[in-house]
Amino acid sequence: MKNILFAASESTPFIKTGGLADVVGSLPKYFPKEYFDVRVVIPKYAAIRQEFKDQMQYITNFYMDLNWRQQYVGIFEMEYEGVKFYFIDNEEHFSGGGIYAGMPWDLEKYAFFSKAVLSILPVVGFHPEIIHCHDWQTGLIPVYLKERFAADEYYRSIKSVMTIHNLKFQGVWNIPTVKSITGLSSYFFTPDKLEKDHDANYLKGGLVYADAITTVSNTYAEEIKTPFYGEGLDGLMNARSNSLRGIVNGLDYEEWNPATDSFLTKNFSVSNFRKEKVKNKTDLQKRLGLAVDPKAMMIGVVSRLTDQKGFDLIAYIMDELCQDSIQLVVLGTGEERYENMFRHFAWKYDQKVSANIYYSNELSHQIYGSCDAFLMPSLFEPCGLSQLMSLRYGTVPIVRETGGLKDTVEPYNEYEGTGTGFSFTNYNAHEMLGAIRYAEQIYYDHKKDWNKIVERGMKADFSWGNSAKQYEEMYTWLAGY
Ligand code: ADP
Ligand code: GLC
């Protein structure tokens, strides 16, 4: 039996801002229980729904030395769908309405969390062979593991894995502050360790000290070795390329299943989507105040509204696109300029564009289940889960060929009758518009071919099975048996 501990800043169903939570909340379920005991640790944020807090069990508390003072560490636990979750409690760090508060507060919060993750292990009686760390918030775990904890026999054999879900976020601040926050000595703040461009960098620490590095698609694993995608760490990614591999994300096929999804007006499957799926569309049109027209091609967007996702391209051609016979349904929050851009077009073309500037799990399911196409023209995309959800719900993705989008969406080839979506290569607004218009043409003029694209997408398998096996192999190799 191998013990694995996932450490992350978010996980479904407890707390989520993006795909990281989907991965951390679903992957642990897919390891064979006879061989792997995979548990998860996240902070006990005040923002977690009361319903879940009520189900957590208090275990114990102790005081931990950090940042020149003794800090309270409370431990709660709860089993969810067969996986044990630990929650680290500290009101000072994890109160407030959201998850992230920005720098430098988050640096202090996640230094505390990272050290607490290691400190609770003997207390809860779970000794992992491997700690699997996700993104910059847990970047200090591999560092602490090799630093003060290495003196202790209990910790010496523990290996660490660092998974990059997004290289853009690194957790950066000036060295004197980080030194004092983390208690790490000057030894760690050199360019071969945590220092980058004269600042301290949590993710870099994790990437230097982890025993293995993964990222969430093969293409992104290659891309981050180049200056364009490398966010200043391409040199390090090249240096560690022997320890770096891409393992594409999967989807929780139980949670995301159009045949049983209780958020949908009408459930459907690959055998009856041709008749049934459209009922979701007309219902959504009614509720969102769009023109009710079963034939209109409805394009969905569900996303954090940041420049990563290619919204500059959409803004550039929005007026042109709205001249076509399409409808656009947007669900997202983020940068104000994109929020306002969509609000503006929803006002200008009120029968065609619906801007829903908030977070709603329910509406996200309904958009995946109602739309004909899904637009995701990302500037970069480590993996992307929205396009996988779209494929599963018979919604044809229109994507830029980057990162995980390239690895999961096969471009339509009308001559060979293959492909599950539409794609374009360059980060160029009219190239994107060309791909959208090609999709419109197939949708309106070649409906049979369109439905075959839908069918191929729904049949494609992006459940966790395959990828979980690749993680298993890596754990086995790292643990040395
Ligand atoms: P990222 O992690 O970069 O945000 P992914 O495609 O991997 O991108 O995952 C995004 C996840 O967040 C998906 O599950 C998507 O449905 C969800 N999501 C994004 N914005 C919203 C929103 N406003 N409301 C509900 N779900 C959202
Ligand atoms: C990040 C990436 C996204 C990926 C997700 C889960 O948020 O932006 O592409 O799917 O992590 O790995």
Image (cartoon, rainbow, N blue to C red):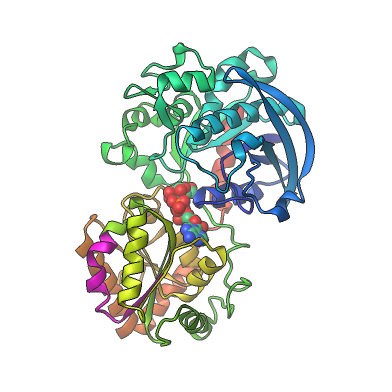
**Quadrant of residue 232 within the rendered picture:** top left
Work out whether 365 lies above or below 226: below
Q: Where does residue 365 sit, x and y in percent of width and height? A: 54, 68
Q: Where does residue 432 sit, x and y in percent of width and height? A: 25, 64
Task: Look at the image and say whether residue 322 sits in the magenta stretch.
Answer: yes
Task: Look at the image and say whether residue 299 sits in the magenta stretch.
Answer: no
Q: Quadrant of the N terminus?
A: top right
Q: Residue at x 64, y 28 (%)?
A: 116
Q: Residue at x 42, y 17 (%)?
A: 189
Work out whether 323 lies above or below 91: below
Q: Where does residue 137 sit, x and y in percent of width and height? A: 51, 35
Q: Tally the marks.
A: 0
Q: Nearer the viewer, residue 198 or 147?
A: 198
- Residue 6 visible to the viewer: yes
Q: Residue at x 39, y 77 (%)?
A: 298
Judge left or right: residue 472 versus residue 292. right
Q: Nearer the viewer, residue 321 or 67?
A: 67
Q: Where does residue 401 sit, x and y in percent of width and height? A: 31, 56
Judge left or right: residue 300 versus residue 316. right
- Residue 37 visible to the viewer: no
Q: Nearer the viewer, residue 274 or 182?
A: 182
Judge left or right: residue 226 versus residue 184. left
Residue extent of the magenta highlight: 313-329
**Quadrant of residue 300 within the rendered picture:** bottom left
Work out whether 295 lies above or below 112: below
Work out whether 185 lies above or below 111: above
Q: Quadrant of the C terminus?
A: top right
Judge left or right: residue 312 versus residue 252. left
